[in-house]
Amino acid sequence: MWNMEDGLSIASSKPLGCTIRAVAADTRLLVAGGTDGFIHCWRAVEGMPHLFELRSSQHNQNTEVRLWGHDGPVTSLALDLTRIYSGSWD
């Protein structure tokens, strides 16, 4: 994540073990899909929309979720109020 006003990096995720091919975000959720077929999801920090805990602290395991359902790389992602939409090479 980057602070656009300062042009500085403010957070980075732990290594995900794949190449990320798609990213989508709203005020509640950040999702990234990659070559491993997983969709990696991070919830926004409570009370701070658009700020996500990318390192997934041991104190709050609910900040990061991995979804699986594709056999090929995830290449597109979109969000609405209740769903994550994903596209893949499969």
Image (tube, helix red, strand yellow):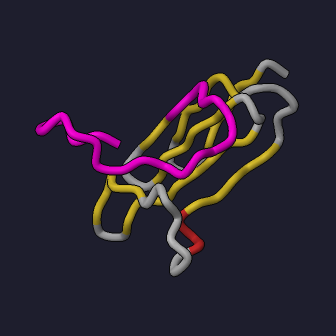
Which residue is at 77% across, 35% downward? 37
- Residue occupying the point 82% across, 26% down: 72
The x, y position of residue 71, in whole percent, is 87, 31
Q: Is residue 55 left or right of residue 38?
A: left
- Would you place residue 70 above or below residue 30 in this image? above
Q: Position of residue 83 (x, y in %)?
A: 61, 46
Can you tell which quarter of the image residue 87 is in? top right
Task: Tell how many labels.
Answer: 0
Residue 76 higher or lower than 10, as above or below: above
Percent position of residue 2, x then y: 28, 40
Quadrant containing the N terminus is top left
Camera-nearest residue between 16 and 34 = 16
Q: Magenta segment, principal secondary structure?
A: loop
Q: Which residue lies at the image location 48% right of the left edge and 51% below the top edge?
A: 29
Q: Is residue 29 left or right of residue 16?
A: left
Asked if residue 48 is among those painted magenta in the image, a careful observer would answer: no
Residue 14 belongs to magenta span: yes
- Residues in magenta, as a range: 1-23
Q: Is residue 12 left or right of residue 22?
A: left
Depth check, front residue: 59 or 17: 17
Q: Farthest residue in the bottom direction?
A: 59
- Position of the C terminus, as image quadrant, is top right
Out of 79 and 38, give the one closest to the viewer: 38
Task: Name the spot of residue 77 as percent of width and height, x first.
Answer: 59, 31
Q: Choose between 32 and 16: the one closer to the eye.
A: 16
Q: Please give the name of the residue rendered at 58% of the width and 71% of the height, measured from the top-left corner.
A: 62
For the view shown, which residue lies furthest in the left direction? 5
